[in-house]
Image: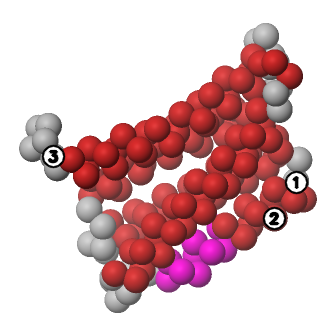
Amino acid sequence: MAQGKPTSHLLMQGLTYAGALPFIAGALSHIIGYGGVNAANLTCYWAFTILMFMAGTLWGVQVVAPQRVRPNLFIASNAVVLATWAALWFVPFNEAALLFALGFGILLWLDRAAVRAGATEASYGELRAHVTIIVIGCLVLIASVPSGIVG
C-alpha cells in the first residue's frame, strides 16, 4: 500500500489513466499525420470500446444501489452507447469524435449523479473527471484539427 491506499485502488487509478493513453496517442498521431494511419478512425473505435466499458460500470452501480441513483443508469448508459454506435456507422470519423466527446461528457454527468447520491465514492468521481477531461480534449482535437497539420 502507498499512502494508505489499498492496492486495488491504486490499480484502478493506474488502469483508468492507462485507458487514456490510446486517446493521447491517437490525437498526436492525427495531428502529425503519423505514417498515413487514420488516427481518427482508430481513436473512435477505442472511444466506443471505452464507452461500452464505462456504461457497464454504470450498470453495476445501478445493480448495487438501484434506489439511490436517478436517472436510471441502465437506460441512460444504453442510450449513450447506442448513439455512439450509430455514429460509427453513419458519421465521418472526425465528426464522430465530437459525438464521442459528448458521450463521455454524458457518462461523466451520470457518474457525478451516482457520486452525489452516495452510490459511488467521491474519489472515483474525481478520477473519472480527470481522465474524462483528457479524453474529451483528445477527441475535440481530432475533430477540429486537420490531420497532419504539424507533420
Q: Earlier in the sequence, mark 2 or mark 3?
A: 3
Dot 3: within a 10 Å radius of its alpha carbon, few (fewer than 14), some, or many (20 or more) residues?
few
Q: Identify residue type, mark 2.
A: Ala
At horizontal 83% and vertical 32% (from top left) the residue drawn is 38
Q: Is residue 87 left or right of residue 1?
A: right
Badge 1 marks a residue whose secondary structure is loop
Please give the residue where the numbered disc 2 appears in the rendered image: 86
Badge 3 marks a residue whose secondary structure is loop
Residue 95 among those drawn in magenta: no
Residue 78: quarter of image: bottom right
Q: Is residue 32 left or right of residue 115?
A: right
Badge 2 marks a residue whose secondary structure is helix
Residue 32 lies, in percent from the top left, at 75, 16
Q: Identify residue type, mark 1.
A: Val
Q: Earlier in the sequence, mark 3 or mark 1?
A: 3
Dot 2: within a 10 Å radius of its alpha carbon, few (fewer than 14), some, or many (20 or more) residues?
few
Distance in Å between CA atoms under marks 2 and 1: 8 Å
Residue 138: quarter of image: top right
Residue 134 lies, in percent from the top left, at 52, 37
Please give the residue where the numbered disc 1 appears in the rendered image: 91
Q: Quadrant of the C terminus?
A: top right
65 or 136: nearer the eye?
65
Q: Is residue 116 left or right of residue 37?
A: left
> Are circles 2 and 1 on residues that touch, CB within 8 Å?
yes
* In front: label 3 or label 1: 3
> The magenta stretch spans which residues?
72-80
Please give the residue where the numbered disc 3 appears in the rendered image: 5
